[in-house]
């Protein structure tokens, strides 16, 4: 009888699981929908406001993007948002994509790198450096360390040049210090992100997010590159690689002699493989390679180009580029000021005729809106059009907010339905459990009666 009871119990248990198992998926679905309940109302409000601006600020003028990359970016973005780890300033498609690329699209490693960047910015007060740091020794440093931005490459990226072979490190350390020069470098990186790239993007009518660089190392070797110089190079390389990833398009090291090549073996040991892949070390026959990337008008004459900048005291003593044009600077701040507006929201653009060396994209790649040929003067003076555009954008925001409200209302209704269904199932399970307990009581009573009869 005991064996029959055990078999019956196992059969009933299996039947119970068959009864309960179909509701597992229902429970998990409910939990997935209710995950938003973990967020505070403030977080939800902030999330709604963000999504009303843009789901992903891609800033792509021609609307062409890699779908797989977008999926990775969306996954990283959702992961950071879920933990309130994505400041609005960095909620940008291309910012997140840079960290993903640097970590081979490993979302976990990209997230770790991104969070390390945020921690570094807080510890080093980067925002304060970008806003308040004054590099009074700028002119003196330029004289003993010739470097600077000089126009754009053929794609429209900023062109940065250093004449490292002419650096006087002893004098540099006299007029400045390693700490102050590092702060100056950080401020320049911030300026590139907030001003140079947006201005170049506006002129090029496509996203610009990296720099082409030329380092002239003529005469540089192990003997005249002191320990302080190597330490400064390593510190700057660490900052650029870890906290401003994927902002280098290509680095051309030119006039590399035997002395530099020996030094290069030491320097490249502290650089990441992905960065090294973007560096070309060239000898004295570099010009044909450089001219493939840079128009002669944007290349200083001392490197084989046609520019002299004689009116401003030399090619590397000014910050030459579209970002120095006041109208373009103002327009780019209006379009990219908060890092949230996409190219799809741009209804006007800037003519590029004043910036030789940049090649216009083909007509087939122009966005139907941003490809309109409107001058910058029209953009800034046509207030009526500006007001209309603002109204259109505000209407879009209102529509997106309404859609989000409707989405949350639908989610709430579905959640209520699911909870109602779960409560019904809970009652059914309670009744089923009570029936099973009743069977157990009846079986126990039957056993007791049988025992009494046996004793009699």
Image: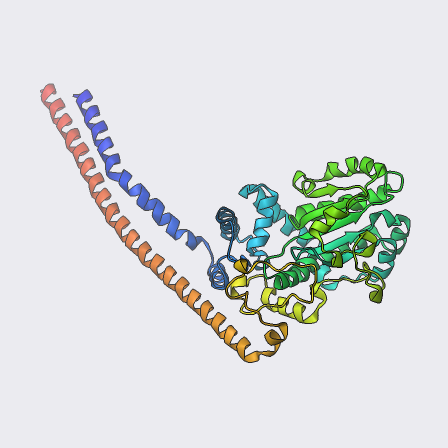
Q: Nearer the viewer, residue 11 or 22?
A: 22
In the picture, residue 412 is in which quadrant? bottom left
> What colour scheme has been applied to the protein in the rendered image?
rainbow
Q: Is residue 374 visible?
A: yes
When the figure is inspected, residue 194 is found, relative to residue 455, above or below; the finding is below
Q: Residue at x 47, y 72 (%)?
A: 392
The percent position of residue 276, horizontal first and vertical second, equals: 69, 40
The percent position of residue 300, horizontal first and vertical second, equals: 80, 56
Q: Residue at x 60, y 49 (%)?
A: 98
Q: Residue at x 63, y 75 (%)?
A: 377
Q: Nearer the viewer, residue 269 or 121?
A: 269
Q: Is residue 182 visible?
A: no
The percent position of residue 220, horizontal first and vertical second, equals: 86, 43
Q: Nearer the viewer, residue 154 or 110?
A: 154
The quadrant of the image that shows the N terminus is: top left
The quadrant of the image that shows the C terminus is: top left
Residue 67 in the figure: left or right of residue 262? left
Figure disc tally: 0
Q: Residue at x 66, y 66 (%)?
A: 353
The percent position of residue 267, horizontal first and vertical second, equals: 77, 39
In the picture, residue 92 is in which quadrant? bottom right
Residue 426 in the figure: left or right of residue 34? left
When the figure is inspected, residue 280 is found, relative to residue 311, above or below; the finding is above
């Amino acid at each position: 009888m005991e064996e029959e009871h055990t078999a019956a119990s196992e059969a009933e248990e299996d039947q119970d699981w068959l009864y309960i198992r179909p509701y597992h998926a229902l429970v998990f679905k409910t939990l997935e929908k209710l995950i938003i309940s973990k967020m505070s109302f403030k977080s939800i409000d902030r999330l709604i406001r963000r999504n009303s601006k843009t789901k992903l600020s891609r800033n792509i003028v021609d609307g062409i993007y890699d779908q797989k990359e977008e999926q990775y970016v969306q996954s990283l973005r959702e992961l950071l948002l879920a933990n309130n780890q994505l400041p609005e300033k960095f909620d940008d498609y291309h910012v997140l994509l840079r960290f993903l690329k640097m970590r081979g699209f490993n979302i976990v490693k990209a997230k770790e790198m991104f969070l390390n960047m945020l921690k570094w910015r807080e510890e080093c007060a980067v925002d304060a450096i970008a806003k308040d740091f004054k590099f009074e020794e700028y002119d003196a440093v330029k004289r003993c360390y010739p470097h600077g931005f000089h126009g754009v490459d053929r794609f429209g990226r900023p062109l940065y040049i250093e004449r490292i072979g002419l650096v006087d490190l002893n004098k540099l350390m006299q007029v400045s210090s390693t700490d102050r020069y590092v702060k100056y470098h950080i401020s320049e990186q911030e300026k590139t992100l907030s001003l140079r790239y947006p201005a170049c993007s506006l002129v090029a009518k496509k996203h610009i997010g990296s720099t082409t660089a030329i380092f002239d190392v003529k005469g540089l070797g192990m003997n005249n590159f002191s320990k302080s110089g190597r330490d400064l190079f390593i510190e700057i390389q660490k900052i650029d690689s870890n906290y401003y990833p994927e902002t280098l398009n290509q680095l051309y090291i030119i006039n590399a002699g035997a002395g530099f090549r020996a030094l290069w073996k030491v320097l490249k040991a502290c650089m990441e493989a992905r960065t090294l892949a973007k560096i070309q070390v060239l000898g004295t026959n570099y010009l044909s390679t450089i001219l493939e990337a840079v128009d002669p008008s944007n290349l200083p004459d001392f490197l084989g180009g046609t520019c002299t900048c004689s009116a401003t005291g030399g090619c590397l003593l000014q910050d030459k580029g579209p970002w120095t044009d006041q109208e373009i600077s103002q327009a780019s701040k209006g379009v990219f000021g908060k890092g949230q507006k996409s190219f799809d929201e741009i209804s006007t653009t800037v003519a590029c005729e004043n910036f030789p060396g940049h090649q216009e994209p083909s007509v087939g790649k122009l966005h139907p809106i941003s490809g309109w040929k409107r001058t910058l003067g029209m953009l800034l003076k046509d207030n009526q059009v500006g007001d209309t555009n603002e109204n259109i954008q505000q209407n879009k925001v209102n529509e997106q907010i309404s859609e989000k409200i409707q989405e949350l209302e639908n989610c709430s209704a579905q959640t209520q339905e699911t909870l109602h269904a779960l409560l019904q199932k809970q009652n059914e399970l309670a009744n089923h459990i009570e029936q099973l307990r009743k069977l157990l009581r009846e079986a126990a009573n039957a056993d007791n009666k049988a025992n009494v009869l046996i004793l009699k």
